Amino acid sequence: MSQLDVAQLNFSYGENSLFKDFHLSLKAGEVGALLGPSGSGKSSLLHLICGFLNPQSGQILIGGEDVTALPPEERNVGVVFQDHALFPHMSVSENVGFGVRSPSAERERIIHRYLELVHLADRGKSMPSELSGGECQRIAIARCLAAEPKILLLDEAFSSLDEELRLELREDVKKIISEAGLTTLLVTHSADEAKSFSDRIFHL
Amino acid sequence: MDSRLRGKLFLAFLLFLVAIPILNLLGQLVDINDPKNKEAIEYVFQSDILLTLGQNTVLLVLLTTVLAGIIGLVQATIVKLTDFRWSKWLSVGFILPLMYPLYVLAFIYDGGFSYSSSLMTFLRNNMSEGLFTSFNTGSVGFVAFVFALGLSPYFFVFFMSAIDQVNPRWVFAARSLGHTPGSTYFRLILPFIKPWLYAASIFVSVEVLSDFGGVSVFGYQTFTLAVYESWLSLFSLEIAALLSLVPLTIGIVMFFLIQKAKVQSSYSRFDRDPIVLFRLSSKAQGLTFLFLFIYFSCVFLFPMLQLFQWFLQSHLSQSIYGSLELLATTLGLGLLAALLLVSGSVFLIYYYRFHMSQTQKKWTPLVNIGYALPGTIVAIGILYATRWVGVSVSGGFALACLLLGYFVRFFAVSFQMLEKSSQRMSPTLDWAGRSLGEKPWPLFTKVHFKLLRGPVLAASILVVVEVIKELPLTLILRPFGVNTLATRLFQFTAEGQWEEAAFPAMLIIALGALSLFIGYLGFGSGDESA
């Protein structure tokens, strides 16, 4: 069964049509990569899936539920951005716990679990400004996973890192999402990254 | 003499001038056994004057800050976080109340809500007679309301700058993590803008604490008013100086808090994408229009109509001629002050750029401390200092004292404008010139000063306008018989002659708008020097 279905999607900015009867489907636990050059609409598609943009027509289904008309906060989609978008005025723990809706003790346990998962259990009290680029990206991933999303979207999530760190983090993230069985869509402009990270590649 | 030593001496001289009123007021504490000081201490501590003034001042500062903060926050939210159609116009409109000095807004509201005013007569005849008969314009709530109208732009500007630094992707992240627009606003945006909230609160508190004209019009007793009245009515410079210690200390603390806030409010900038956190429904649009109507009625419609009505009721030719005559005197005073202050600032910029060590550069911001001190307190400090000289404060000496007062209060206005423009000039400009064989001073005059011509003009205009608007310093230190627009306005309002006060007020507002245009809307900021 598909976990993410984008069906007959039409979207344009003014008169500039970006998607015409676009279709994309990912099975539960599958990892897809959206490959295309700058300006091809990769990030716009993620914004459509998240609900930050609304299509002119078509459907977006997550876990079989039609979410096309739902606001972003009701879609349960996790997004990791290229610049990690950590909240600079909150500690690492506060960032990771931002999307967790559990009572205090349970919340702390969840935060700790996901910090451990990204190998940063000892950095809970640090501020984002005290972390390296790779650590920030790990925290951003932990923040998404802690909210237990139905699907995970990675928007050029490894692009801002240097080569060595990128490879290391990519492997780590791949392992984490594989263990969690999380349906994931990676947006990238690198064919190598798309091949090594995903089960399927969609070209734009 | 070595240039570095000259730079050091020049900075020391400027700091000495700024320190004259401050150190003289603090000096009383050393001279505690002086009989006059003893008498003043007994008077102040045996009455409950300190407690009353303290309570009044704190209450007014708190209420004004809270009210102005709420207004500023609502305004910045409408402009920056909604899809409201006229946001661009509002971003200018919400700043405009800064063109009113507080005492002008205060006298319009005091007169406009007095028993015999057209508005109150209309309200008594058509609505509740009882309510509008006993309306008290001197109540802390009303004073704070009027002050908040005049000072809310500070909050607006700070919040705008804060929200500008919100990365749109933080909002995307928060929404995708399950937060609604409201929850994103309260849990993400508001905590993020806290440093700006603190900074704006300090600015507004300083303005309220420094105000003399506004509280004087309303007859609301705060420290600045009590200091003035002690000097004027009790003929006691000692009591005035003693009472001055409280606002002086608060002013100094506030100055250092402002310096600290500058550092704390530095987050990294991001390319701006519009953030539409709230899409306004038709009901929300209606509420926004209602807010805007009430706000603009309070800050523009009512004050302007009231002023115009009084103006028509005044002795027109006498009022216009008298005011223009005063404007000429005031302009002369302002130009003299601008010449001194801007020249001082240019020299300081030169030494700062070419000859100062890092330690000296750290001391330089102290020359700005006077801007955080109330004019009344600076004036009393200077009067207190003249006791050591033993010359009566009149004629040329009074003029020198007045110019010293303007220097202490407004050096920051000219120096900060020039400093901002100077910082935009890359150090490579200096290195290139020096490597081509130019010595610092000729290089500065040929290159830097030419690039600074726009900001020098802008700083001069700002100083002139500040001097024209300035009230307590001028009132206390002016040479006998010399009046400015502000002092004449003060006399008219003290006698309840609202009609005669209208035209000078209109002139002051027009000049305030000019100053606002230069200071906030970017004219003369020296972009050409970037």
Image: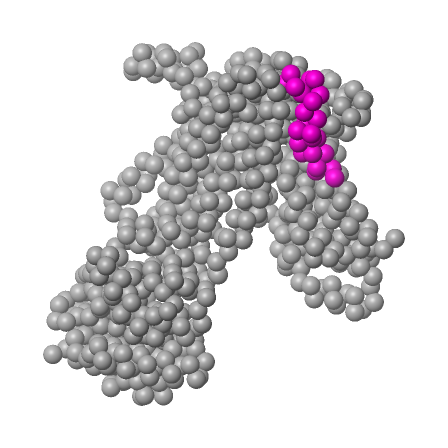
Q: Is residue B99 above or below residue A82?
A: above
Segment colored magenta: B16-40
Q: Nearer the viewer, residue B209 or B169?
A: B209
The prevailing secondary structure element of the residues shown in magenta is: helix
Q: Nearer the viewer, residue B293 or B267?
A: B267
Picture quadrant of residue A202: bottom left
- The residue positioned 49% from the left and 23% from the top of the image is B51
Q: Can you see residue B146?
A: no
Left or right: where does residue A18 sit relative to residue B507? left
Picture quadrant of residue B514: top right
- The residue positioned 42% from the left and 49% from the top of the image is B194
Tell whether position B93 is magenta: no
Q: Position of residue B507 (x, y in %)?
A: 59, 28
Residue lying farthest right?
Answer: B1
Left or right: where does residue B520 sit relative to residue B84? right
Residue lying farthest front?
Answer: B33
Q: Position of residue B384 (x, y in %)?
A: 71, 25
Tell whether position B25 is magenta: yes
Q: Position of residue B228 (x, y in %)?
A: 61, 21
Q: Is residue B245 above or below residue B500?
A: below
Q: Nearer the viewer, residue B523 or B406?
A: B406
Left or right: where does residue B405 sit relative to residue A73? right
Picture quadrant of residue A132: bottom left
- The residue positioned 59% from the left and 16% from the top of the image is B43
Q: Is residue B324 above or below residue B434?
A: above
Q: Can you see residue B62?
A: yes
- The residue positioned 67% from the left and 59% from the top of the image is B425
Q: Which quarter of the image is occupied by the C terminus of chain B?
A: bottom right
